[in-house]
Amino acid sequence: IVTYNVLINAMCNEGDVDEALSVLRSLPSRGCKTDAVTYTPVLKSLCGSERWKEAEELLAEMASNKCALDEVTFNTIITSLCQKGLVDRAIKVVDHMSEHGCIPDIVTYSSILDGLSNKGRVDDAVELLRRLQSYGCKPDSIAYTTVLKGLCSAERWEHAEELLAEMVRSDCPPDEVTFNTMIASLCQKGLVNRAIKVVEQMLEHGYIPDIITYNCVIDGLCNEMCIDDAMNLLSNLPSYGCKPD
RNA sequence: CCUUGUGGUUU
């Protein structure tokens, strides 16, 4: 079954869900008993292409095969729903986890935070972040960064800076993704000078700006009609140890 | 820690 699970996952990652489904269908005749790992990648692919009905049928099939849903399966579905903007539906799924003996974890909540942030419901995201402790989850850098992105999208820079400062104070310090998130948002909103200050902060924290960092700044410079600066930065990338992509 | 599935950054 592990062999077939690897195969099914690979097919899903290549975009061949239907091929994966046909392998899944063939498993009983090969004497293999499917498990949650078999179904999860297929569910992820189906949800990713918004084939919700088939996903639900597959979930029903799992139930009838007495194949228990686990945390990863739930998190996969919840993440897909959030990525498709269906965060309220995702929250309902979270509420059903305990019936299956599953406890929402930091991955579950990070997905919800992302869904809320992307819907512009950043105040709800902040509130959920604050409640994580009482749900038995310790916020980590990913959870913070997700909410930070929501604040940046809403151009609530002061609040975003506060959250960043809070991360530094607490025991989940910002990482390269956190800094890149802030830099990307500032550059997108035409605040390249402010973004460059964050690049300096990034260096102070021991993180080396990477190609994503520079792509954001170059893009921001171009949008501000500073093509010469952008060209300069681009030609200096190799000297910063970065290969343009 | 040791065969497979889940969360945050640019285009």
Image (spheres, coloured by chain):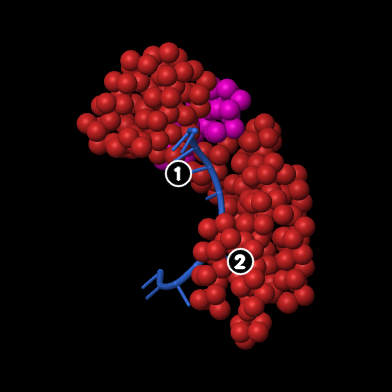
Chain colours: A red, B blue
Q: Are marks 1 and 2 on the same chain?
A: yes
- Residue A185: x percent and y percent? 51, 27
Question: Residue at coordinates 73% horizontally, 66% vertically from top-left?
Answer: A58
**Who's the residue at 40% across and 39% down the image?**
A176
Q: Residues within 10 Å of mark 1 (few under 14, many from 20)?
A: few
Residue identified by numbered label 2: A19
Sequence order check: which comes first, mark 1 or mark 2?
A: 2
Residue A10: percent from left, percent from top: 51, 64
Does residue A71 appear anywhere in the picture? Answer: no
Relative to A198, A40 lies left or right: right
**Residue receiving disc 1:** A171
Instruction: Give the overall secondary structure of the magenta segment.
Output: helix
Q: Quadrant of the N terminus of chain A?
A: bottom right
Q: Which residues are magenta?
A: A148-175
Query: What's the residue at 34%, 26% (across, down)?
Result: A200
The disc numbered 1 marks a residue on which chain?
A
Q: Extreme bottom residue here? A: A31
